[in-house]
Every structure is written in C-alpha cells, then in structure tokens.
Image: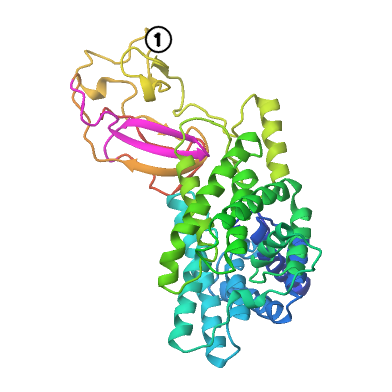
C-alpha cells in the first residue's frame, strides 16, 4: 500500500489519455494489496462489482481523485501509479457501505474524496522527505474520520459495517469465513464472495504474500478468540484485515522474504493486535471505528525503528519497494551472488583527486566502538607532508577548503553548518564531529562527512544528491 514506481507520464492523443486513466484507476485498486499490476487492480475492481453501489462509488471516487490531481497539476507519475487515488477510492467505498444515499452524504463524500488527494500528496512528500516513510493509508484515515464526524453533525443515517455481510455457506469452516470476510473487508465488504475474489487477486499478485496473509489470518483468529468480549461481531474481520496487511507488509513488501522476515512479521502482527485491542475502548468512546488504524501505527513505528539499524541486519530491508515479494527475493539473491553484498550501494571516495587515509577502522585515536568504521583523510605532497610552511595556520594545510562530495546517490538527512573552525591544536571536544552532512543511501545505509568548514554546506535536509555532488568544504571544526 502506498507503493510507487517509475511510470511514464501521459502521452498525447486520445489513446494515450485513455491508457493513462485506465492505469491510474486499476493501480489505485491494486495499491490495496501492495501491487502495481493492472491485472490485480482489474480483479479487485470486479470484486467490488458484487456490490453494485460499492462499485459505482469506488470507481467514481477514483475518477474524481484523478480529475482533482490533474486540476492541481500534481505529478503525473504519482497519479498513474495509483498512489493519489487509493485513499480516495477507500473514502468512496466507505461512504457507499456506511452512508444512506442523501444529498448531504454525497456532498461530504465528494469533499472527502478531493481532500484525500491533497492529503495523500502532502503526506507522501513530507513523510518521504523527512522520515523516508510511506504514507500507507494514513491520508484515508484522517479524511474518513473527518467525514464520519461531519456525517454525525449533519444527521446523516449511518449503517453498521456488519450489515454488509451476507450469510456464508453452511459447509464453510469458520476459520475460512473469517479469512475471506477479512479480505473482503479491505474494501468495506466483509463478505465471503468478495473475499474470494480478493483472494484470487492476491494469488495473482504473489504466492509469498498469500502465505503471509494466512499467517496474519491465523493470528487474528487466535487473538479474536481471546478478546470476544471487547468488541461486537466485527472484531474478527477487523483484526483480520489489519493482521493480514501487517504480515504481508513486513514479510515481503518492506523486508526481503525469509525466515527472519517471517518471525518479524509474526511479532509485528502481535503488536498490531495489542494496538487494536488497546485502542478499541478509546475509539468506542469517540464512536469511531478502528478501520485500518492499527496496521498504520504498527508499520510506521516498525519501519522507522528498523531505519535506525546500524548494519545490514536480518531481515534485510528491501531497497526499492514496489515489486512483488518474489521480485524482492530474486533481486536480493542476485545482488549477493554478483557483488557479494546485500545492499545496492556502491560507495566512492567523498573527495576529488588523491588523498591519504590518516586513520582507518579501529583507529588508535578516535575510531572506537560505534565509530570504529570511520575514515580520516588528508592531502599530502610528494614528501608525505600534509601542510606547507610551519603548519601553524589552517591555510597551510593542503586539504583545507577543498570540496567534500557525496560518496553515493542519496538524500540529505541532516546538516550542521555553524561550528567555527578550530585553531591548530585546539580541538572542540564538546562538538566532536563539528560541521557535518548526513546522507541516507538505502535502508540501514548512511554516510556522514564531518569537520566541514563553517558556512560551506551546499545542501539542505530533504535534498536529493548524486554521487560526486559537492556537500561542503573541508574544514577544521570539531
């Protein structure tokens, strides 16, 4: 969910515009299963056709979202990926199932759909730039909770989600009913027939994702059985779709499928259960449904925490989400077989020309413990001297105020640029690293260039950089 890829902008001509709209609509549906496949989106769209009103509202919401995004001249690439349409589609589906079809209901639904586009665009930029996190369905939640509040103020009759259910066949085991209803409830349709279609789309997308969905559903049934007195009859499938999405997301979307990702998925799913059950009484007081809130809170917290890992630990993170779990696994294995490394980053020297390493890993002076993998570089002349004259002034040193560049493609995380250069022989022990630029390159891969000259930083937080771009000038801070 909230996955984007490199898709072409719309091409000219009627055929090109039609293809663009079809892509945007189908991929908006596919986003719910972390897919960018038009075929998966088509199957899911047909699944909602089992409830004609849901089909009409959902499809109209996506088309309105597309028109809104084009009106505001938002990124055609994001529109075509479905990223700017899936939250609006969920708003439309929720309105179709929960609201009586009144003029007021239609009005707040239209406003909510348009607002979801703006909210998605804003959160996609903000969360991606400052935290390197996906927006997931947070835009939908924020907007739909506002829509529900407005509906109560306007006295719009609300239906209970459980009324959308239809009796399951008598021969069907209860665990299968819960599983299929959970899948159908992803589209506000907790029905076994809709769930069966969603299951077909999931199998079309990824068999690995399907396996993780079974893990999530099994845990949901287990937890719901222990908490039957907390909520009404919707608890099993509410836990179900939150658990299923959590297991799939952790097991194969943001982490490479493996035994380690399976264990992490189980742990994350149980945390999701605690979040769901813990929030249930609070949400009941506010007369708000849980919806997909537990999944969002769990995944955002987990991804942010795992971004802080200092090594390529297990399970390895996916370097570019957007494919299927199978594709992530193949890319990971191919990279390791070809380069002997799990990570896609080729690191180069952060300077131009020939410099000399004066302190490397486990250096005897300062490179200890968490900083044991640091490198110190200086420029030396043919005689091995790093300065001219008596070396008493900063300008005597050959490396002083030479460019310091990005070691690899990435984005700027943090910049410190205000510490003064220190006189020779007088280090600043309170600010050890002085002025610095911190870059993010890939999950768990960062680079830090330190001791820059004050006022020399050439980048700002959130800026994208390419290998060799100037970050600042070599200084004597820190």
The answer to whether one can see residue 83 in this image is: no
Q: Quadrant of residue 29 in the image? A: bottom right
Residue that label 1 marks: 382
The answer to whether one can see residue 326 in this image is: yes
Horizontal side of residue 224 vs 12, given as left or right: left
Give x and y (percent) for residue 157: 53, 87
Give x and y (percent) for residue 91: 57, 74
Give x and y (percent) for residue 93: 63, 75
Q: Residue 452 colored magenta?
A: yes
Question: From what the image shows, is residue 255 above or below residue 375?
Answer: below
Between residue 141 and residue 448, name the one nearer to us.
Answer: 141
Residue at 63% from the left image edge and 55% from the top image edge: 221
Question: From what the image shows, is residue 223 above or below residue 165?
Answer: above
Question: From what the image shows, is residue 408 above or below residue 2?
Answer: above
Q: Residue 239 colored magenta?
A: no
What segment carries the magenta color?
A: 426-455
């Amino acid at each position: 969910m909230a996955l984007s890829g490199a898709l072409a902008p719309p091409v000219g001509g009627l055929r090109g515009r039609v293809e663009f709209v079809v892509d945007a609509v189908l991929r908006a549906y596919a986003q719910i299963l972390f897919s960018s496949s038009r075929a998966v989106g088509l199957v899911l769209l047909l699944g909602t056709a089992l409830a004609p009103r849901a089909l009409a509202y959902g499809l109209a919401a996506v088309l309105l979202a597309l028109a809104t995004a084009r009106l505001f001249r938002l990124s055609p690439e994001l529109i075509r990926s479905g990223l700017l349409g899936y939250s609006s589609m969920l708003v439309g589906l929720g309105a179709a199932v929960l609201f009586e079809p009144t003029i007021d209901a239609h009005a707040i639904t239209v406003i909510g759909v348009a607002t979801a586009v703006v909210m998605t665009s804003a959160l996609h930029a903000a969360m991606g730039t400052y935290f390197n996190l996906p927006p997931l369905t947070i835009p939908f939640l924020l907007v739909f909770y506002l829509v529900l509040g407005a509906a109560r103020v306007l006295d719009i009759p609300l239906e209970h989600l459980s009324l959308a259910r239809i009796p399951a066949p008598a021969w069907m085991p209860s665990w299968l009913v819960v599983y299929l209803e959970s899948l159908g409830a992803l589209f506000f349709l907790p029905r076994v027939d809709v769930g069966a279609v969603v299951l077909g789309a999931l199998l079309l997308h990824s068999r690995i994702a399907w396996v993780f969905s079974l893990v999530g559903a099994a845990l949901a049934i287990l937890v719901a059985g222990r908490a039957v007195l907390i909520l009404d009859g919707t608890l099993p499938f509410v836990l179900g779709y939150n658990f299923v999405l959590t297991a799939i997301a952790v097991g194969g979307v943001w982490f490479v499928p493996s035994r380690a990702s399976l264990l992490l998925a189980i742990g994350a799913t149980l945390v999701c259960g605690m979040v769901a059950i813990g929030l249930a009484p609070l949400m009941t007081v506010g007369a708000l449904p849980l919806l997909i809130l537990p999944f969002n809170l769990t995944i955002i917290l987990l991804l942010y925490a795992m971004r802080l890992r200092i090594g390529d630990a297990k399970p390895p993170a996916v370097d570019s989400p957007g494919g299927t779990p199978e594709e992530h696994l193949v890319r990971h294995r191919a990279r390791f077989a070809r380069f002997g490394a799990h990570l896609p980053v080729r690191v180069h020297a952060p300077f131009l020309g020939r410099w000399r390493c004066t302190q490397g890993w486990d250096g005897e002076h300062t490179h200890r413990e968490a900083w044991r993998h640091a490198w110190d570089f200086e420029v030396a002349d043919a005689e091995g001297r790093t300065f001219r004259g008596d070396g008493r002034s900063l300008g005597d040193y050959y490396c002083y105020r030479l460019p310091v560049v990005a070691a690899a493609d990435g984005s700027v995380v943090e910049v410190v640029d205000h510490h003064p250069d220190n006189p020779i022989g007088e280090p600043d022990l309170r600010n050890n690293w002085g002025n610095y630029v911190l870059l993010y390159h890939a999950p768990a891969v960062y680079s830090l260039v330190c001791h820059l000259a004050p006022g020399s930083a050439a980048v700002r937080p959130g800026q994208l950089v390419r290998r060799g771009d100037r970050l600042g000038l070599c200084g004597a801070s820190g």
